[in-house]
Amino acid sequence: MNGSADSPANSRKTSWKKDPEAVKENILAIATEEFAAHGLSGANINEIARKTSTSKRMIYYYFGDKEGLYCAVLEGVYSALRRSEDLLDVAGLEPVQALRRLVESTFDTHANAPHFIRLVMIENIHNGDYLRKSDIVPKLNRSIIDKLEEVCARGKAMGLFRDGADALQLHWLISSFSFYNVSNKATFSASFGTSIYSKSQQSILKARTTDMILAAVVIGYEPKSWN
């Protein structure tokens, strides 16, 4: 016996036909939460399907299998992070201010992207195997290196930056401070309390992170937040 016209199954079929892209976005949004919470092995496709406006069959139709969905989730969180960086227009800023803006923005973006941090931690457990399958992420990640290279080139040309200033090394340093602030929040809080995660303390940490990066790169820079 077929379901009624307004049954959940029929409603899902209608949504697939009307707006398949919205269905895919819904699947990815729920899957991002599930994979971030439970990892690749712990996330359950049946649970993802139950929370979405579609079905397990349609998840497989769009993404192939569970690993395909996980890869799509990884690409999605990297895309979101890089889009926020791409919106930063630093070309019109003088080099020191441009680098400051990039450091501060990275710190804030990571703080506001806990799912991204969790998924990167999970992917590191898998030795980056699934990330290597992506043709999209390497291209996405290139944009922030290009931006830092442009800032470094201008800074050196103006005699403001040290000759050894390197875009890839800078990205590693900036990401390290910003990532650890989120990735180790639970264990750090368990060991030392949560005071460092208050709004005022986070503001100080961001300022000191920025100072340390600028002091390493900018000739004669005197850190201000440590006074």
Image (tube, grey):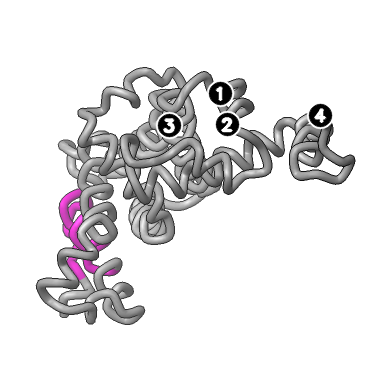
Closer to the chain start, of discs 1 and 4, is: 4
Q: Residues within 10 Å of mark 1 (few under 14, many from 20)?
A: some
Type of the residue with mark 2: Lys
Question: Are circles 2 and 1 on residues that touch, CB within 8 Å?
Answer: yes
Disc 1 target residue: 60
Within 10 Å of disc 4 (Cα), the crowding (few <14, some 14-19, many 20+) is few
| SS for dot 3 | helix
Magenta-drawn stretch contains 5: no
Taking the magenta stretch, the answer to whether it contains residue 210 is: yes
Check the image and report above or below for 62 versus 4: above
Residue 167, located in which quarter of the rendered image? top left
Badge 2 is on which residue?
56
What are the residue bounds of the magenta stretch?
207-223
Q: Residue placed farthest to the front in the image?
A: 1
| Comes first in the chain, label 2 or label 4 | 4
Q: Is residue 163 left or right of residue 147?
A: left
Three-letter residue code for mark 1: Tyr
Q: How many marks?
A: 4
